[in-house]
Image (cartoon, rainbow, N blue to C red):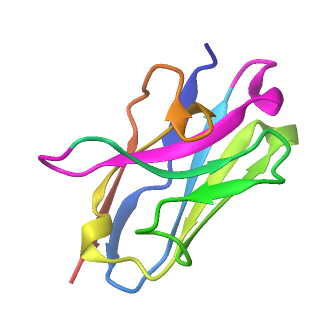
Amino acid sequence: QVPLVESGGGLVQAGGSLRLSCAASGRTFSSSGQGWFRQAPGKEREFVAAISWSGGSTYYADSVKGRFTISRDNAKNTVYLQMNSLKPEDTAVYYCNVVQGTRALGGWGKGTLVTVSL
């Protein structure tokens, strides 16, 4: 299992933007799909976005489609989530994970907290 460390969260006003990063160590990163998930207070963790190992295919939850963009840099073992037009309902702890399709395969890191205020 490749350890994953999320960063980039913070407090932002509605309509603002944030860019999350997920750094991985290990040689299997570039051959694995990667995804972002989030867990809002009192709710179950949900899928947000995923990207294939090559970056050629991406998948998004309907709730973020058109606002969020997932990307990856295999040379840096890092996956990103650019979040634009943020809404208060985007407030959650965001996690990254190795994925198969939209299904998380590995354990969970500490995540990074995103808070969107009105």
Q: Is residue 71 above or below residue 22?
A: below
- Count of marks placed on residues: 0
Left or right relative to 114: residue 66: right
Quarter where residue 66 is shown: bottom right
Nearer to the camera, 22 or 41: 41
* Residue lying farthest to the top in this orientation: 1
- Extent of the magenta region: 25-43
Residue 77 location in percent, x, y? 76, 36
Quarter where residue 32 is shown: top right
> Does the magenta-highlighted stretch encompass residue 33?
yes
| Identity of the residue drawn at 81% across and 50% down | 55
Left or right relative to 82: residue 95: left
| Identity of the residue drawn at 51% across and 46% down | 36
Quadrant location, the N terminus:
top right
| Identity of the residue drawn at 47% across and 60% down | 61
Left or right relative to 32: residue 96: left
Residue 37 location in percent, x, y? 44, 45
Residue 28 location in percent, x, y? 78, 20
* Residue lying farthest to the left in this orientation: 42
Quadrant location, the C terminus:
bottom left
Quarter where residue 25 is shown: top right
Residue 24 location in percent, x, y? 66, 30
> Does the magenta-highlighted stretch encompass residue 31?
yes
Nearer to the camera, 23 or 64: 64
| Identity of the residue drawn at 53% across and 71% down | 65
Left or right relative to 37: residue 56: right
